[in-house]
Image (spheres, rainbow, N blue to C red):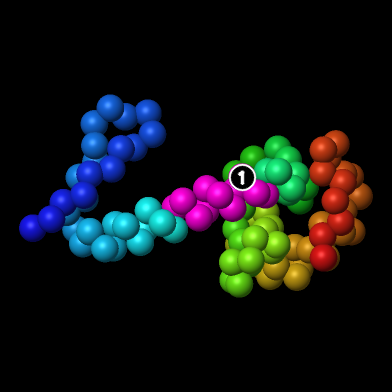
Amino acid sequence: MLYKAKFVEGSKEPLMDTDESVDQQIQRESELRFVTELLEACRQARLIDLEQCPFCGSSNLSVVDSPERDRTGCFVVCCCGAHDSRGETQQDAIRLWNKRSSVPKQSNTRLR
């Protein structure tokens, strides 16, 4: 059986994952690399300068990309949309963002 070791950030020991084939691990690592590059592109585009959600105040924000993976459709996601009908869809979130009354200092961008 083939094993592929990977190092977890902050750890000196490799993490051995025997449940996945080498091809699956390589695919997963490729996807993780893509997400890392996407996050960096979003940071550079100042899309994730938010420190907290403008709707619920949560600091538990994550960034996702558009299904087309074209790097132009990055958007910030907060868990409040899962529990509140105000932001159930991406379009709802965009509408709410554009109508917000208070704008965080570093993010005065209008989303489309």
Depth check: give the residue in front, 84 or 81: 81
Image check: 61 left or right of 28? right
Depth check: give the residue in front, 18 or 86: 18
Residue interval drawn in magenta: 32-42
- Percent x, y for residue 31? 44, 58
Estimate how packed mark 1 is, as few (under 14), some (14 to 19) or many (20 or more) residues with alpha carbons within 10 Å: few
110 drawn magenta: no
How many numbered circles are shown? 1
Depth check: give the residue in front, 54 or 31: 31
Q: Residue at x 41, y 56 (%)?
A: 30
Depth check: give the residue in front, 97 or 86: 97
Q: Residue at x 28, y 27 (%)?
A: 12
The residue wearing badge 1 is: 40
What secondary structure prevails in the magenta region? Answer: helix
- Percent x, y for residue 86? 75, 64
Image check: 17 left or right of 80? left
Image check: 25 left or right of 72? left
The amino acid type, in three-letter code, at marker 1 is Glu
Q: Is residue 62 above or below residue 99?
A: above
The C terminus sits in image quarter: bottom right
Q: Is residue 97 above or below residue 9?
A: below
Q: Residue at x 24, y 37 (%)?
A: 14
Image check: 66 left or right of 12? right
